[in-house]
Amino acid sequence: MKFTLFALLAAFCVLSVNAGTWQPLVMSSDVGMEYESNEFADVEGDFMEPETFLIWGILKRILRCVKGFNCVLKWVVGIKASATQYSDDITACGVEASKEVTALLNTNVKIIQTANNIINLKTNVCATAENGKKPSITNFCTVRTLRQVIRLYVQVKRAIRQSKKIPTIGPNATTCVTNATNTLVSYYTNFVNDVTSCSKLIGS
């Protein structure tokens, strides 16, 4: 039964492609391998939270499929853009960044780095060709991408917590910084829903 489910998922991924997107059409034979938890031992932060394990399980399934991979990548690019925009917005505010804002900016730097890692994986690891044939999604690609997306998820959660420490009233609060932070947090808060919604594409 387990083999049959993986075979059906692989078959769907072969057929489910959209023009104009990165489209590895073949699933490699090692995709059905089970992952050991120590493969994610290097993930720092709140990896042990129940919600993180839930996201891990969902992403593991999504990233095995072409549509799912491209969908997750779209939201990762959006996270990077939001983090970059926040830095620009804070600079444009023209005020000295508080220690709380600085902490959030530093986390955003890590978020941008992780997002870049994921984007680069598509080109350097995941878009591999076998025997001159069309590219395939390998288990190695899935594991590497999954680890980085989980890292990004943990970093985004940390950023949300840090944003709540930024003063919104009182002498240390500024409307410009508050508005920029609210815009960032709005996108970050939707990240989990946006990414997990990619699972709908697997059955479409």
Image (cartoon, rainbow, N blue to C red):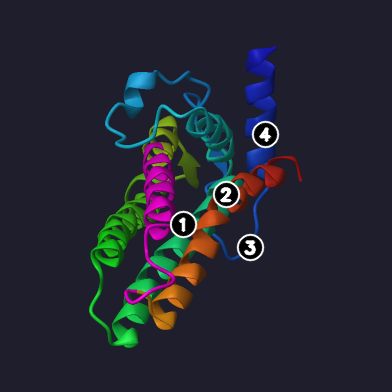
Q: Between disc 3 and disc 1, whose residue precedes?
A: 3
Outermost residue toward the top? Answer: 1
Q: Is residue 77 magenta?
A: no
Q: CA distance from mark 2 to mark 4?
A: 22 Å
Q: Which residue is mark 1?
A: 76
Q: Secondary structure at mark 2?
A: helix
In 3D space, how far apart are the residues under numbered discs 3 and 1 (Cα atoms)?
20 Å
Callout 4 crowding tier (Cα within 10 Å): few <14, some 14–19, many ≥20: some
- In the image, residue 30 sits, relative to residue 21, either above or below, namely above
Q: Mark 3 or mark 2: which is in front? A: 2
Amino acid on which disc 3 is placed: Ala
Q: Secondary structure at mark 3?
A: loop
Query: In the rendered structure, which segment of residues is drawn in magenta?
Result: 147-172
In the picture of the structure, the residue carrying the numbered disc 3 is 19
Give the labeled residue for mark 4: 11
Crowd class of label 2 (few under 14; some 14 to 19; many from 20; radius 10 Å): many
Helix, strand or loop for the magenta stretch, by majority: helix
Which mark, by number, is residue 195? 2
x then y, percent, for residue 69: 53, 47
Which of 93/115 is in front?
A: 93
Q: Earlier in the sequence, mark 2 or mark 1?
A: 1
**Label 3 vs label 1, nearer the camera:** 1
Q: Position of residue 138 (x, y in %)?
A: 44, 35
Magenta-colored stretch includes residue 169:
yes
Residue at image location 66% in from the left, 48% down from the top: 197
